[in-house]
Image (spheres, helix red, strand yellow):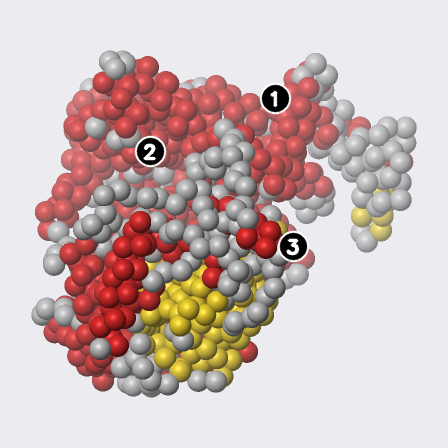
Amino acid sequence: MGERILDVKNLEIDFHTYAGEVKAIRNVSFHLDKGETLAIVGESGSGKSVTTKSLMGLLANNARVKGGEILFHGKDLLKNTEKEMQSVRGKDIAMIFQDPMTSLDPTMRIGMQIAEPLIKHKHVEKKKALAQALEILKLVGIKDAEKRINDYPHQFSGGQRQRIVIAIALVCYPEILIADEPTTALDVTIQAQILDLMKELQTKIETSIIFITHDLGVVAGMADRVAVMYAGQIVEYGTVDEIFYNPQHPYTWGLLNSMPTLESTKLEAIPGTPPDLLDPPKGDAFAARNPYAMKIDAEKQPPFFKVSDTHYAATWLLHPDAPKITPPAEIIRRRKIFAEMEAKKVD
Amino acid sequence: MRKYLLKRVFYMLLTLFLVATITFFLMKLMPGTPYSNQEKMTAAQIQIMNEQYGLDKPVWQQYLIYIADMLHGNLGTSFQYSNQPVTYLISSRIGPSAQLGLQAMIFGLFFGIIIGSIAAINHNTWVDTTATIVSIIGKSVPNFVLAVLLQYYVALKLGWFPIADWGGFSYTILPMIALGVGPLAETARFIRTGMVDVLNSDYIELARAKGLSKFGIVFHHALRNSLIPLVTLIGPYTVALMTGSMVIENIFSIPGIGEQFVKSILTNDYPTIMGVTMLYSVGLVIIILITDIVYGIIDPRIRLTGNGD
Amino acid sequence: MEEKIKLNPDSFQPLPKEEELDNEKIAAPSLTFTQDAWRRLKKNKGAVISLFIILIMVVIAFGSTPFIDKSTLVKSAPQYANLPARIPGLDFINGLNGKLKVGGQWVDQYAQNGASGKYFYLGTDYLGRSLAQRIVYGTKISLIVALVATFFDLTIGVTYGIVSGWKGGRVDNVMQRIIEIISSVPNLVIVVLMLLVMKPGMTSIIAAIAISSWTTMARMIRAETLQLKTQEYVLAARTLGESPIKIAWKHLVPNLSSIIIIQTMYTIPTAIFFEAFLSFIGIGISAPETSLGVLLNDGQKNFQFLPYQMWYPAIVLCVLMISFNLLGDGLRDAFDPKTRK
C-alpha cells in the first residue's frame, strides 16, 4: 500500500449527558494508508460511528474530545477551527450515510445536490459544476443521466439514491471516503451492486476507504485491513486474512462464530450486552461476556500483543504465561485454513 | 391535475351554495324586524314596505329570488342605509380591509419566519427561549387588547402614529401590528418546530458532511423544507384576520368590511349581514383553494410522481 | 506495543462467572405512559407554574360563588364611582394607594369622594362597583363559558372524528365534506349568526362557540383514528368480535387521550378569547351579567383617564391565556414520544 495519510492516536471522546459522562471512545488508535480499505467492525454502541464522525468534526454538541490526535497528512484535525473543517469536509474527507431514503434533500434537484460541493470547494461556476455532476452521475451508474439529473430524490429507488449519495461524496475526488454502513438499509442484491460500485470507483478516484459495518460478510469482500471495536476500544486489528483466519481475541471469535457459513451447523450468539460506558469496567470490557475470561481480565485492561507485523490483539490470552485454551470449533477450522494459506506463501 | 382542480372548484361552488342557503334561512329565523320605527308605522305602511323589499312573498319564493339575484351580483339593499345596494357598501369598503389584511399577513409571515428561524438555529439557547416567550405572549394577548394599548401608548402618548382613521401608509402601521401579531407568533412557533426537525434530519447532516457553511445549509436546504408546510397555515390565518378585522377596524375607526359587519349585526341589517357572510366565505374558499394548489406546486414530492428504477 | 509484563500466575485462573446474564434486561425502570408523561411535564417549569396559576384562578373564581353573586354586582354606588385601587399596607405605591394621577399630580381620590375609610382592592368602575369583585365574578363566567363550550366541542368533535375515521369510505367522505363546508365560513361569523338567531345569553354563547369550533378537533381525531385503525390490536379486537363502540371506548379513546388533552388545552383559550371578543363588540354577555370581555369593553371606554379599569381585567385575561397555552405546550412536549431522551 501507499503512504500513510491518516493517523489516529489515542483518541478519547466523552459524551456529556444528564446521567453523567459516557466514555464513548477510550484510547482508540488506527491508521489509514493511501489506496487501502480499512473496515471497522463492531456491535451497535461500540463507537464505530463516533470515531468516524470525529474525523469529520461532526460530533454532537455534547461531545468532548478528551485527548488524542487525528493526524491527516501530519496536521491535527482536532485543532482545526470550524471553518477549516468545512474546507476539509466534502473535499479531502467525504462521508456516506446509512439510510439513502433520508440522506438527500427532498426539495432540491439531485444535480444541484451533487454540484454543491464542487461549487463550494473548487469554486466552479454553476453550469460547469452541473456538467461535472452529470459526468459523475453516469459514473455511478444512473441510466438516462441527462434527463434524471433534474429529478428529485423521491423519483429514485433506494439503490439509486445511494449511488447519488456516493456521487456527492466522490465528486471532489476526496482522499478519504468514510462509508458508515452504506448497505445496511438496502436489499441484499442491491448491496452487492453498491459494493461493486464502490470498489470500482475506489480505483478510478484513487481514494482510501474507511468502511464501517457490523456485517462480516461485507468486510470479507471489501476490506484490506480490519479493526474490531468493542465498548469504545479497538480490541484486535490486522489484515483481512489474519482477522478472518487467525483471530486471537475472544470477541472476534464470537463475531465469526455468529456469522453463518456454508460449513456451519449451529449459529452461536454472544450472550449478554455491551457494558454501560457511563462507568466502564476497569479491566477488559469484554470480560463479562467472555467464556475464556481470567481473573486478570477483571483487574487490568490488556495491552496489545503482537501476533505479526500487521496483526495485534488486546487480550490477556496472548500473554506468554497465559494458559493454552481451546478456541471454539469454528475458529479451529479457520486456523487450519490460515495455516494452509501461510504454507502456500512460503513456497 | 386538471381533474383535481375541477373537482375542487365544484366542491367550492357547492359549499358556497350551501352557505348561501343556510345563511338565508338563518336570517329568516331572526327575531326583530328590519324597520327601525316599526311601532310608528301603520299596517298599510308596513305592507308597502314589505312589498318593496319582497318580504310579503312565501319564503321559498324569496329564497329563489335571493339566489337568482346573487348570481347576478345583486345582494339586495341594505336595511340600515336604505337605497344603498349591499354590493356598493361592500365594494366601497373592501379596499381598506383587503389592504390591512394583506399587510398584516405579510407582516406576520415575514417576521414570524425570521424569528422562528433564528430560534431554531439557536435551539435551546437564550435566544430560543426569548423568542418562545415572545411568541407565547403574542399568541395569548387578544388582538383587541393589544390594539387599545397600541392606540393609547404609541399613538396618543408617543404620537408616533395616527390614532385612528384611514389615510396614508402611517395609518396602517398600528392596526397592522395589532392584527398581525397573532399570525406572527404562530408562524414563529411553527417555523421553529419545523426547522428544528429539519436541522436534525439526515440530509442536513449530509449537507454538513459536504462542507457547506451553516448559513449555506440554512439558506439552501433548511429554509425551503421548513417553509413548504407553512402554506397550509394561510387558510386559518385568513380566518383569524377576517375575525380580527371586525374589532381592529372598530377600534381604529377604519372604514372597512369588518367594521361594517359589526354595525350591521347591531342594527339587524340582514341583507348586509348575508352579503358580508357570503363575501367572507367566497374569499376564504378561494384562498384555501389557491393555497392547496400552491402547496402542490412547491412541494416536488406532490408535483411529480416517481419514475421508479 | 509489546511489554514484558510480569503477572501473578494466579491471574490466569478462570474468572468466576456471575449468574446467567440476562440478555433481555432493560436497565431503566419501566413506567406507565402517564407516569412517564407526568415526570416529563414536571420538568417543564413553565408548564407547572401555569398549572398552578390556572388551579388558583379556578379556585378563586368558583370559590367566590357563595360570596359574590349577581345581586352584589348589580348594586351600584355612584358615590364611589371611578376610584383607583387601594390596598391596605401598600400606601407607598402610587396607583395602589387610592391615588390617581390627575393633571400631572397624584391626588387621593378616596379622600376627595369622602371614602377615606373604604378599601377597594382593585378600585371601582363607573358605577362605583368593586372591580375586584367584578373581575373575580367575570373570570368565573368566562371560565364557565369556555369550559362548558370546550366540553361540548370536545364531545362532538371526538365522536364525529372517531365515527368518520372508523367508518371510512363514503361515510367518511361525506362527513369530511360537511366539515369543509362549515370551515368555509369563518367561525366567528357562524357564532355571530347563531347569536342573532338565538336569544342572547350565556347558553347561546356556549352553544355558538361549541358548534363553530368542533371541526378542528374532529379533523385531528379523524386523522389519528385512521392511523390507529390499522394497528394490530384493533384488528385483534375486531377478530374477537368486539362491537365498534366498545373498541372505540376501550382502545381508541385511551390512545387518543393525549391528543384530546393537548387539543383541549388549546381550545379553552380560544373559547375564552371568543367570549371576550364577542362581549367586547357588544354581542356577547350583557348586563347585568359580566365577563372578562364585558369588563374590557367597559374599561376601554375610560381608558384615557382611568387606564386601570382596563388593565386589571386585561392582565387577568392574558395571564389565563398564557397559562393555558404554556400548559398546552408543556403537555404536547410531555406526551410526544419523539422528544424522549
Task: Characterize the local packing of mark 1: few (<14), some (14-19) or many (20 or more) Cα atoms within 10 angstroms.
Answer: few
Amino acid type shown at disc 1: Pro
Query: What's the chain of the residue with tag 1?
Result: C
Query: What's the chain of the residue with tag 3?
Result: B
Between label 1 and label 2, give the one nearer the viewer: 2
The Cα–Cα distance between marks 3 and 1, rounded to whole angstroms, is 31 Å
Q: Are marks 3 and 1 in contact (CB under 8 Å)?
A: no
Residue picked out by circle 2:
C224
Would residue B129 be visible to someone looking at this image? no
Q: Secondary structure at mark 3?
A: helix
**Residue A230 shown left or right of residue B128 in the figure:** left
Residues tagged by mark 3 and mark 2 found on one chain of the structure: no
Q: Which mark is residue B153?
A: 3
Residue A324 x/y as whole percent: 44, 55
Residue picked out by circle 1:
C288
Could you say which quadrant of the image residue C255 lies in?
Answer: top left
Between disc 1 and disc 2, whose residue precedes? 2
Q: Residue at x 25, y 75 (%)?
A: A345
Q: Secondary structure at mark 1?
A: loop
Query: What's the chain of the residue with tag 2?
Result: C
The Cα–Cα distance between marks 3 and 2, rounded to whole angstroms, is 46 Å
Residues tagged by mark 1 and mark 2 found on one chain of the structure: yes
**Residue A224 shown left or right of residue C126 in the figure:** left
Would residue A29 be visible to someone looking at this image? yes
Residue A159 x/y as whole percent: 19, 60
